[in-house]
């Protein structure tokens, strides 16, 4: 069944660790390159170069930021006007673009990308994931088209000036430039010929015509010009004398930084620029790169966070109306992302402060008012607070109330350490601003349930390790003139900044290793804490007409109970998603609807997703009210038992199996729970043989297991050879209330069972069900059956339909349906309900892990 397919998907998820380590490895290589190229640079010289940049140049750099972010806002405005006309206010589109890039430009992390930020904003305006992806794709295509055109034009018009960054001859550069311009011209001609469109997320999205494409390219040129102007303004004049070379180097560094996926292109952009400009060993170039990162990356993010804090304050005091109120509501979903960014920036600021020496004048002032011990403690405390802020940022992104409280405490501790160890006024003012803005976001952090702040996934651990490595590298860079000796670890003196740095680096490394170890052993704990089965569950199951609802008794689920005792909902917790097994069980539709929302709200409080697996049509309106996607998972086969008979040509195979079993001395026997102790050893032997023959193990979640604790809830139907008394096959019976349905769960046989044995057992059970007055006999599901594999169907339907039609090599999809079809059943659809987009495969992988009982936590 689909259980095996999703079990395979769960194994694919193991590749996440490798993908998380790749950006860390790239950043490490880039930092190593920067270290080699700056080996003759002194930290004091860099500090002098920073202070020597004229104010007019800084103002010009800020103007470049304004120009670039104006273009970034225009990307989304033009895309929204073209793709979703009239559905999104243009001022909201502008803010969404700027906010998305302000976050992604600074952080560059997969969990805090500009796409995710814009999706949160546009989702409030009613846009689907496909429409948001179309807007993002339009923005990126505008940037790359402009970059290609600009690079091609430079190579064509000034081939001699490009010789340094691209070591090829002028003739080859001219040819490449013509080729690049030809690509751009070809795309524009293709768009001008007739209306074009692409399909994203099952929706047909129109592409811009020639006029729109030209407007977007002009916007891209403005974006590139503004961002390049920031770096040009702060670089020394001799490094930017060749404009063509500088622009080409900037485009190359930006492109490689984007493709590297390292946090904010950290190290990668700097290394490429130093090489392209031939500026190894120049402190003024290093200082310019530091200023560029502060002005272009940190400044817009600080402005965005401050603006969002002001909006939150005004909204809380009900001083907003009209477009201001609309903007505040639209931006509310990105508050946790921005808060996480604030914690990260503050943490990095404290880490860097702990790695750099204190100025001579500052140190002299400290000696007059502070004891040495307080300086030692404050610098170490500041570094530790910075590292913990980086770690806690993940909890802020997940809206954890505990994370907000801890972050506020760490910011306060960092502020005290900053004042005691300096005071470094820019750093202290930054921490005060972070405290104020984060304090204004208090209402956004309402999740008080489960969640461990010091348990990180591989991606976040990689990010923490990269940032700590960068801070430690900066410390070794600053103290490269110090001759390292063993006694440095134990020297405590006012002038021994290097000793304080070494001790702090050791403490940071120990903390990172401890958090990594804690995350590792926590991830190997149980996936969930299933609860004892409450008495109300047994009571409601006894009244439930759906026989398969009794899978709730499998012992691996938790329960939500209606306070009035009218319904329950069984679910499992993977660590990232609360997944309901089937619909709520109960005879009150209102109580069932309340439990659906209760699971959704529980997931929100605990920072998890929510999904409903193998549900029917009865509660689809309630699932749609959640704003989730409804995806068909397959169909269930049910045989009507009213008037059931083995006569007729369509029952020939079943009739022959039953008759042959009788002739050869096989009979069906029902073993009630009270008599199972004597027969369980024989049943277990059949089960073990069946599992061994298939190289399989017991499953969970959507299947029961051959254990006394589970089987004691059911009658067991066995196929026994009357002469020898040997049991050769068995199944446990699930009985719906009031004779509504008879169903099966485990269906197992050993090598002694004849080929017709299971068909015969099914035939005996259907005849028994008819005689006992049952109306339906459920044969279980056929995964991926009934999905429409057509051009205009949804992406999931087309993928599922393709797997069903062509996946016989891996699983007998069509064979299973054909086996059940010979009983002439009626087919009923089953659905998966969950957030749409890329969440679907993630949820399927987690369901596969639950079913296959993988001993890993999906964090």
Image (tube, helix red, strand yellow):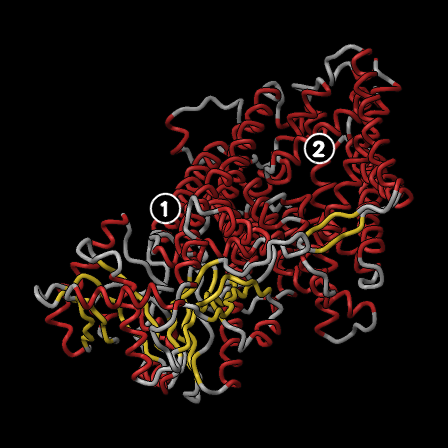
Rendered view: 70 above or below 184: below
Q: Nearer the viewer, residue 247 or 293?
A: 247
Q: Which residue has dot 1 on it?
A: 517
Q: Which mark is residue 254?
A: 2
Q: Which mark is residue 41?
A: none
On the picture, is 434 further left or further right than 447?
A: right
On the picture, is 104 further left or further right than 658?
A: right
Rendered view: 641 above or below 514: below
How many residues crowd around disc 1 within 10 Å: few (fewer than 14), some, or many (20 or more)?
some
* Residue visible at 68% across and 23% down in the picture: 274
Q: Nearer the viewer, mark 2 or mark 1?
A: 2
Residue 326 x %, y %? 78, 68
On the picture, is 615 further left or further right than 324?
A: left
* Residue visible at 47% across and 47% down in the picture: 807
Quarter of the image with the C terminus is: bottom left
Residue 639 x %, y %? 41, 73
Rendered view: 766 above or below 311: below
**Which sits earlier in the primary sequence, circle 2 or circle 1?**
2
* Residue visible at 17% across and 56% down in the picture: 752
Residue 316 x %, y %? 70, 73
On the picture, is 509 further left or further right than 676?
A: right
Instruction: Give the image quarter of residue 858.
Output: bottom left
How many residues crowd around disc 2 within 10 Å: few (fewer than 14), some, or many (20 or more)?
many
**Residue extending furthest left?**
724
* Residue visible at 72% across and 32% down in the picture: 50
Residue 503 x %, y %? 43, 37
Q: Secondary structure at mark 2?
A: helix
Q: CA distance from mark 2 to mark 1?
A: 35 Å
Q: Nearer the viewer, residue 86 or 423?
A: 86
């Amino acid at each position: 069944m689909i259980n095996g397919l999703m079990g395979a998907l769960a194994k694919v998820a193991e590749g996440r660790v490798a993908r998380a380590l790749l950006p860390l490895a790239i950043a490490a290589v880039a930092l190593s390159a920067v270290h080699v190229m700056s080996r003759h640079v002194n930290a004091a010289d860099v500090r002098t170069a920073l202070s020597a940049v004229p104010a007019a140049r800084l103002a010009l750099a800020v103007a470049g930021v304004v120009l670039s972010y104006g273009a970034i806002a225009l990307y989304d405005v033009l895309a929204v006007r073209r793709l979703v006309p009239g559905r999104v206010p243009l001022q909201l589109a502008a803010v969404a673009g700027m906010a998305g890039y302000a976050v992604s430009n600074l952080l560059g992390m997969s969990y805090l990308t500009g796409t995710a930020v814009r999706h949160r904003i546009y989702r409030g305006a009613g846009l689907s994931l496909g429409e948001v992806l179309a807007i993002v794709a339009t923005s990126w295509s505008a940037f790359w088209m402009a970059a290609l055109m600009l690079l091609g034009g430079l190579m064509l018009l000034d081939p001699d000036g490009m010789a340094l960054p691209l070591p090829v001859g002028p003739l080859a550069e001219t040819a490449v430039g013509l080729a690049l311009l030809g690509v751009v011209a070809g795309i524009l001609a293709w768009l001008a010929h007739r209306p074009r469109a692409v399909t994203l997320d099952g929706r047909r999205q129109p592409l811009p015509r020639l006029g729109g494409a030209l407007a977007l390219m002009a916007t891209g040129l403005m974006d590139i010009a503004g961002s390049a102007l920031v770096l040009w303004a702060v670089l020394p004049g001799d490094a930017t004398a060749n404009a063509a070379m500088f622009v080409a180097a900037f485009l190359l560094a930006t492109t490689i930084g984007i493709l590297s996926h390292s946090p904010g292109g950290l190290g990668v952009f700097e290394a490429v620029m130093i090489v392209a400009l031939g500026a190894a060993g120049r402190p003024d170039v290093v200082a310019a790169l530091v200023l560029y990162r502060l002005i272009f990356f940190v400044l817009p993010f600080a402005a965005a966070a401050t603006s969002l804090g002001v909006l939150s304050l005004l909204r809380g005091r009900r001083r907003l109306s009209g477009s201001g109120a609309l903007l505040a509501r639209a931006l509310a979903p990105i508050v946790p992302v921005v808060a996480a960014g604030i914690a990260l920036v503050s943490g990095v600021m404290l880490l860097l402060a702990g790695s750099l020496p204190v100025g001579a004048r500052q140190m002299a002032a400290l000696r007059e008012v502070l004891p040495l011990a307080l300086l030692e403690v404050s610098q170490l405390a500041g570094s530790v607070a910075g590292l913990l802020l980086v770690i806690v940022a993940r909890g802020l992104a997940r809206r954890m109330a505990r994370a907000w409280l801890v972050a506020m405490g760490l910011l306060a501790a960092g502020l005290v350490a900053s004042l005691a160890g300096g005071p470094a006024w820019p750093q202290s003012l930054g921490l005060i601003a972070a405290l104020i803005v984060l304090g204004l976001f208090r209402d956004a952090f309402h999740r008080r349930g489960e969640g461990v702040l010091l348990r990180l996934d591989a991606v976040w651990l990689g990010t923490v390790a990269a940032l700590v490595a960068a801070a430690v590298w900066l410390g070794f860079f600053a103290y490269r003139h110090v001759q390292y000796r063993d006694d440095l670890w134990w020297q405590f003196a006012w002038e021994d900044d290097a000793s304080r740095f070494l001790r702090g680096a050791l403490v940071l490394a120990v903390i990172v290793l401890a958090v990594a170890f804690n995350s590792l052993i926590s991830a190997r704990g149980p996936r969930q804490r299933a609860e004892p089965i409450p008495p109300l569950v047994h009571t409601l199951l006894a009244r439930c007409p759906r026989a398969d609802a009794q899978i709730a008794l499998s012992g691996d689920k938790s329960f939500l109970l209606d306070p009035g005792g009218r319904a329950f909902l069984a679910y499992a917790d993977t660590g990232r998603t609360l997944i309901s097994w089937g619909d709520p069980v109960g005879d009150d539709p209102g109580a069932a609807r309340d439990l659906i929302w209760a699971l959704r709200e529980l997931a929100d409080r605990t920072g998890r997703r929510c999904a409903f697996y193998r549900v029917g049509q009865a509660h689809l309106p309630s699932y749609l009210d959640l704003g989730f996607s409804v995806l068909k998972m397959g169909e269930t086969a049910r045989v009507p038992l009213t008037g059931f008979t083995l006569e007729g040509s369509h029952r020939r195979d079943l009739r022959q199996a039953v008759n042959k079993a009788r002739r050869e001395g096989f009979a069906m026997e029902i073993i009630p729970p009270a008599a199972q102790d004597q027969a369980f050893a024989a049943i277990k032997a059949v089960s073990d043989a069946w599992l061994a023959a298939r190289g399989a193990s017991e499953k969970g979640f959507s299947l029961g297991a051959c254990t006394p604790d589970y089987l004691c809830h059911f009658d067991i139907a066995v196929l026994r050879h009357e002469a020898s008394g040997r049991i050769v096959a068995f199944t446990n019976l699930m009985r719906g209330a009031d004779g509504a349905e008879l169903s099966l769960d485990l269906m197992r046989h050993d090598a002694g069972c004849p080929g017709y044995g299971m068909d015969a057992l099914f035939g005996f059970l259907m005849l028994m069900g008819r005689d006992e007055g049952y109306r339906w006999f459920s044969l279980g599901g056929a995964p991926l059956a009934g999905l429409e594999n057509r051009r205009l169907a949804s992406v999931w339907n087309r993928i599922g339909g393709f797997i069903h039609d062509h996946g016989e090599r891996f699983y007998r999809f069509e064979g299973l349906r054909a086996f059940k079809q010979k009983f002439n059943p009626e087919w009923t659809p089953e659905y998966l309900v969950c957030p749409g987009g890329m969440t679907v495969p993630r949820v399927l992988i987690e369901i596969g892990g639950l079913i296959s009982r993988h001993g890993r936590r999906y964090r």
